[in-house]
Amino acid sequence: MATIKVLDTELELDLLDADELEKVDAAIQAVEGDAQQDPALSQADNMRKQVGAVRKAFDTIFGEGTGLRVMGEKNHLGVALTAFAQLTDAVHTQRAEFERSI
């Protein structure tokens, strides 16, 4: 298990736990699908949708309310993109460490 820092929030992430790895993979894939632009929505609504997808991923992986704790209440796309990038970087780092150890 490792402590990762996303924005100013410390979170526990353990990709050696198969159940947690499965949750992480599913949450990241969901963001990639849910964050697609919908031409029927306004630009602001698309941004809200994208921020919501990232917030939901944090809730799925780390527990209900984590997305709000990490990203705050605003629907700020820049904050969401930074948080998601930091999460995926941490995931890639843990995977690389695991692969080097086997």
Image: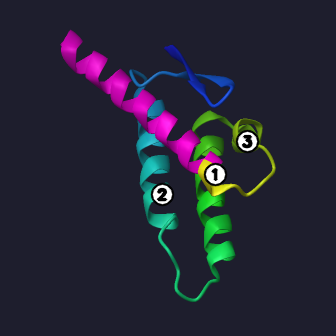
Q: Position of residue 42 (x, y in %)?
A: 65, 82
Q: Quadrant of the C terminus?
A: top left
Q: Is residue 43 left or right of residue 96?
A: right
In percent of the image, x 43 and y 38: which residue is there?
Answer: 88
61 or 93, which is in the foreground?
93
The amino acid type, in three-letter code, at marker 1 is Lys
CB-based contact (under 8 Å), mark 1 and mark 2: yes
The amino acid type, in three-letter code, at marker 2 is Ala
Q: Which residue is mark 3?
A: 64
Find the distance from the CA under tag 2 to the CA under tag 3: 16 Å
In percent of the image, x 81 and y 49: which residue is there?
Answer: 73
Q: Is residue 65 left or right of residue 36?
A: right
Residue 37, numbered circle: none
Secondary structure of the residue carrying numbered label 2: helix
Q: Position of residue 54 (x, y in %)?
A: 59, 51
Mark earlier in primary sequence (1, 3): 1
Secondary structure of the residue carrying numbered label 1: helix
In percent of the image, x 73 and y 42: which residue is there?
Answer: 64
Q: Position of residue 49 (x, y in %)?
A: 63, 67
At label 2, counting other C-alpha atoms closer than 10 Å, the crowd grade (few under 14, some 14-19, many 20 or more) is: some
Name the quadrant containing residue 9: top right
In the image, residue 18 sits, relative to residue 26, either above or below, namely above
Confirm whether the magenta stretch covers residue 89: yes
Q: Which residue is mark 2?
A: 30
